[in-house]
Image: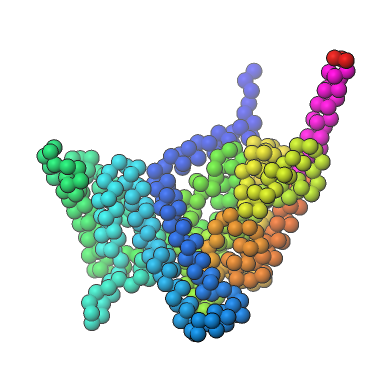
Amino acid sequence: MEKKNSFFDTLQEVLGKVSVKLSGNIYINAIKDGMLAYMPFAFIASIFLIIAFFPVPAFTDFVSNITGLKAGIWQGKLALVNDASLGIGGLLVLLAISRSLADKLNINGMQVTLTSVVAFVLLVPFGSDKSGSFIATTYLGAQTIFLSIIISIVTAKVYQFIDRKGIKIKMPAAVPPAVSAPFESIIPSLVVITLFWILRLVIDAFNGGSALAIFNTVLGMPLQAVGGSLPGIIIVKIFSQLLWFFGIHGDSIVNGVMTPIFQVLQDANKTISMAGGTPTNIICQSFWDSFGGIGIVGSIIAIILIAKSKRYKEMKKIAGVPYIFNVGEPTLFGIPLMMNVVYFIPFILSNVVSILIAYAAFALKLVPVCTGIAQVPWTTPLIVSGYLTTGSVAGSILQIVCLVAVVLLWLPFVKIADNQILQEEKQLESQMKEETHKEA
């Protein structure tokens, strides 16, 4: 009689197929590469912005006194790093994704990247004054990330299509590649630029609208509405944890899709905060990193609190310290949590508990919404990240509340697993004693 697949076998099979398609998708991978290339600048800018807008008035006064400058002046100098990095975030993402996608499609990376820049500039609104035309940096920042992604993909695909058809200026074989490559790219680049130029003319014909405004209205706003909603982030987190449960790097797959959305929401909060206003986007990159990821850490804390088995006592030494810096691999592989049916419920739902608690605290205004100014690395310890991202001790307290809640969720399941291991260890000790007695 043929054995029927269990629920977990079926789920693993379905998720495995989905993950293979997503992880093998060159466009998702190119977007992920682009956002990863963007991340260091987000952290660097955050360092300068944290110093400039440190949420302690005494610190601001101290810097003003030792520099002899008004706060607005020295803060503006520090903010220059933000203007030079995240201020052109959309352009940085465009460059990174274009190059990554060109490499994956095996086409001329340099020319595709430059062509994408020209196409991007064609669709960005121009301003003008007495000195001539200009592009405001507002149209180069994170709000253009969605547009940058589309331009990068369209440019690369059109370029690839023309290139594969062999429609290009062919130079003699004796001409060095460094010289021939730019000439061969003229026709593919011309086609791409002409297409975006025509699109610009069409857009201009409709009451002077901009591609950025149209795109953000048609696609950007719906993406932000879904990705920035409580149900949306819960579904995404559950999907990520399901992948992790079966040994698939869930964050790697999910972040490729969600990071652009979270970054746009993060940038909107940052802009409002720097202007002295109150940010409104509860869900953003900081929420995802500092509050949406409090879950699995509850397992190792529960083990530290109640575990009696020898195996788990050793795990305390191995997994406890790394989790101070949110490094969870020792816990995932050492306990193990993955493919462990006993831990399925807390593994999938502990992060959701943290998300619900944090979202409620922000929505009820018990804790200030993440300012967007500090985008700290994911390795930043809890309590510290809560304070920096919200600019308030209430953020740290909220993380502690979330941590207590997820530990309480993990405790009964850890107790069950620990008892099972204790029984196994007792049986093993009995067997060893019997074997020793027989040998004697």
* Outermost residue to the front: 66
**Residue placed at 83% from the left, 22% from the top?**
431
Q: Percent position (x, y) of residue 362?
A: 63, 67
Quick check: 369 above or below 331?
Answer: below
Residue 40 located left or right of residue 128:
right
Q: Nearer the viewer, residue 223 or 24?
A: 24
Q: Decide whether the magenta segment is chiefly helix, strand or loop.
A: helix
Q: Magenta includes 326?
A: no
- Pick the front one: 167 or 42: 42
In this view, the residue farthest toward the top is 439
> Who's the residue at 72% across and 44% down the image?
317
Q: Position of residue 16 (x, y in %)?
A: 53, 36
> What residue sits 73% from the left and 45% below the top?
316
Q: Which quadrant would the N terminus be assigned to in this image?
A: top right
Q: Which residues are magenta?
A: 413-437
Q: Quadrant of the C terminus?
A: top right
Residue 421, given in percent of the width and then of the height, sits at: 78, 34
Determine if residue 167 is in view. no
Q: In terms of depth relative to the viewer, which is nearer, 84 or 218?
A: 84
Q: Residue 168 vs residue 51: left or right?
A: left
Residue at 76% across, 43% down: 414
Q: Is residue 261 above or below residue 416?
A: below
